[in-house]
Amino acid sequence: MLPEGLALQHFIQQETAYRVASAPAFTKLLTFYQLEARYRYSADLRFTVIGRVAYDPIYDLQNLTKTNPFQDRFASSTPGTVEDADAFDAEIREIYGDFSFENTDLRIGKQIIRWGVIEGFRITDELNPIDFNEFILRVLTDRYIPLWMLKLDHYFDRSALQFIWIPELVFHRPAPEGTEFEQFQKPPGLQEPAKTFEHTEAGLRFSTYLAGFDLAFSYFDGWDDFPTASQILFGFGGGGQSPNAPARYHRIRTFGLAFTKSLGNELIKGEFAYVHGRAFGTVAAANRTEMKRPQLKYALGWDTRAPFGVETFFQFSQQWIQDHQDEIIADELDSGGSLTLRKKLMNERLLLKLLAIYIVNDEEVLIRPRIDYRWNDHLLLSFGADIFEGKEGNIQQDDFRFIGFFDKNDRIYTVLRYSF
């Protein structure tokens, strides 16, 4: 019997992936056990620990060139061995304490905090960096890297003010070199900011309900989690680095607005962000290695119910670089959209899902059909596919394609989860 106030949730999950588009092969045989322990000491004091132990022997069972035969996409200097993809991994993903006072909540510890209302497009939601170990194919909680943070929420009558302080400096984590979803690496000679108090990150978010809208105004003073590559795009490409301008991270300030509005069974939502201080990499032939330009990001979403009870989610996003110059690698206006369809059957034991993400500028799409079947209260079976469509591009010629880069990596996969 568990001690009073302690609740445990745990599961074991097995994931298998098989590449089907080109050079067919098994690329994942991941098994992990996750334990979530929540202890309620009192009404005002609670503790949470989420830990995971994982094992994926795929790189031990077969040659790397079979798991990832497409390494000729990279510069010749790219290592041909997997250096950081260990078969065994154990980590405490989240650990924090919750303290409640009158009209105020305080959470201290390693955690994930989401500010956005548009899922998948990071407009105002840029607090936690991304782990690209499996591109963007894992669920959000697995893609986000938990950080040590302090979160303070103070509640008014119909409003709330949230303060975030992040003393830990962690940036986007690329997939290990040589692995299947290696797409970018940290550039050689990358300069990281010193771990000092002045380099910590902080943010404010004020949320309220006004005229039928849930509104949130935010300000974040932190770091761009992608470095600006000096004449080298994400660590690849020719031309070398200028000794006077090594690759580095840049401090940015983001002013954001998010809203949701319920219209019966419909829900509209949106996010807007103005980013000051963002630096953009330039082509190798440019006289300058980076240019700072203001950036405007925005996204709109519509949640509705289509015929036959199909839950439907539309989203559209754009990013606009003000005062754009031809030397900047990124497009002046970058557009993308997503469509999600969900249908529950058999008394909600069967879930059919389809996600499609379309990048307008490069005419590339990621299609993700999936079937979830809940056998009983403990066992969940899933089968799905990840289909990449688009031009592969050429990183060495500053022709970067986010989705089309993996055009040869289409795969099918299975997931088996047993919850205790």
Image (spheres, rainbow, N blue to C red):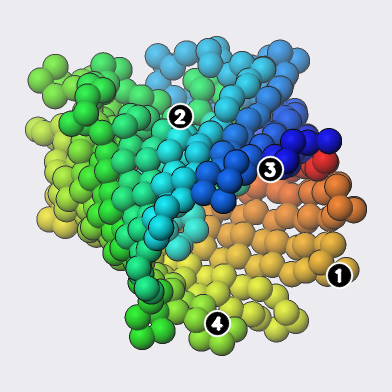
Percent x, y for residue 365?
53, 55
* Res. 266 mark: 4
The numbered mark, 3 or 1, whose residue comes first in the sequence reads 3
Which of the image's four quarters has the C terminus? top right
Given this view, does label 4 or label 3 mark the residue nearer the observer? Answer: 3
Real-space Cα separation, disc 2 to disc 3, in angstroms: 39 Å
Q: Which residue is mark 2?
A: 174
The numbered mark, 1 or 2, whose residue comes first in the sequence reads 2
Real-space Cα separation, disc 3 to disc 1, in angstroms: 33 Å
Q: Are marks 2 and 3 in contact (CB under 8 Å)?
A: no
Task: Bin the neighbour count of mark 3 within 10 Å (Cα to Cα): few under 14, some 14-19, many 20 and up.
Answer: few
Q: Are marks 1 and 2 in contact (CB under 8 Å)?
A: no
Which of the image's four quarters has the N terminus? top right
Residue 259 vs residue 412, the one in the foreground: 259
Q: Report the amino acid beneath label 1.
A: Asn
Q: Residue at x 44, y 17 (%)?
A: 78
Given this view, does label 2 or label 3 mark the residue nearer the observer? Answer: 3
Real-space Cα separation, disc 4 to disc 3, in angstroms: 39 Å
Percent x, y for residue 408?
60, 38
